[in-house]
Amino acid sequence: MSDDGKKDPPRLHRVMVRCAESGEGVPTGVRIDPASFESSNLHEQSFSCGHCFQEHTWSKIDAWTEAWDC
């Protein structure tokens, strides 16, 4: 809780998936709080991978959240 008594907004985490080419975890560009991620049904999303520069398609089953400082 903040100093003024108001509830702080949930901390957003990055949604990550594994690059099929490099095997590295890469951010999808989606940010979400972990509780919302758990209750979501994200499916058939795509993004351009920063590791292999190809388009990856992913769904919630392929992903995890990771804390991010920004």
Image (cartoon, grey):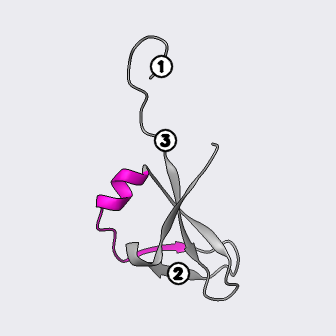
Can you say which quadrant of the picture contains the N terminus?
A: top left
Which kind of residue does numbered mark 1 sit on? Answer: Ser
- The residue lying at 66 percent from left, 89 percent from top is 21
Please provide percent x and percent y for residue 9: 41, 33
Label 1 belongs to which residue?
A: 2
The amino acid type, in three-letter code, at marker 3 is Arg
**Secondary-structure class at tag 2:** strand
Q: Earlier in the sequence, mark 3 or mark 1?
A: 1
Residue 11, numbered circle: 3
Q: Tag 1 or tag 2, which sits nearer the N-term?
A: 1
- Left or right, 50 with respect to 18, comes to right
* Nearest to viewer (mark 2 / mark 1): 1
Picture residue at 30% right of the left edge, 62% below the top: 40
Query: What element does badge 1 sit on?
Result: loop
Q: Residue furthest bottom?
A: 21
Q: Quadrant of residue 50?
A: bottom right
Q: Residue at x 43, y 49 (%)?
A: 33
Q: Secondary structure at mark 3?
A: loop
Q: Position of residue 70 (x, y in %)?
A: 63, 42
Is 37 magenta? The answer is yes
Name the residue at the top extreme.
Answer: 4
Label 1 Cα crowd, 10 Å radius (few <14 / some 14-19 / many 20+): few
> Residue at point 44% right, 10% down?
4
Q: Which residues are magenta?
A: 34-47
Dot 3 crowding, Cα within 10 Å, few <14, some 14–19, many 20+? few
Residue that numbered label 2 is attached to: 56
**Left or right of 68 in this view: 11:** left
From what the image shows, is residue 10 above or below residue 52? above
Identified by mark 2, the residue type is His
**Few, some or many C-alpha atoms within 10 Å of disc 2 (few <14, some 14-19, many ≥20)?**
some
Disc 2 vs disc 1: Cβ atoms closer than 8 Å?
Answer: no
Look at the image and say whether residue 69 sits in the magenta stretch.
Answer: no
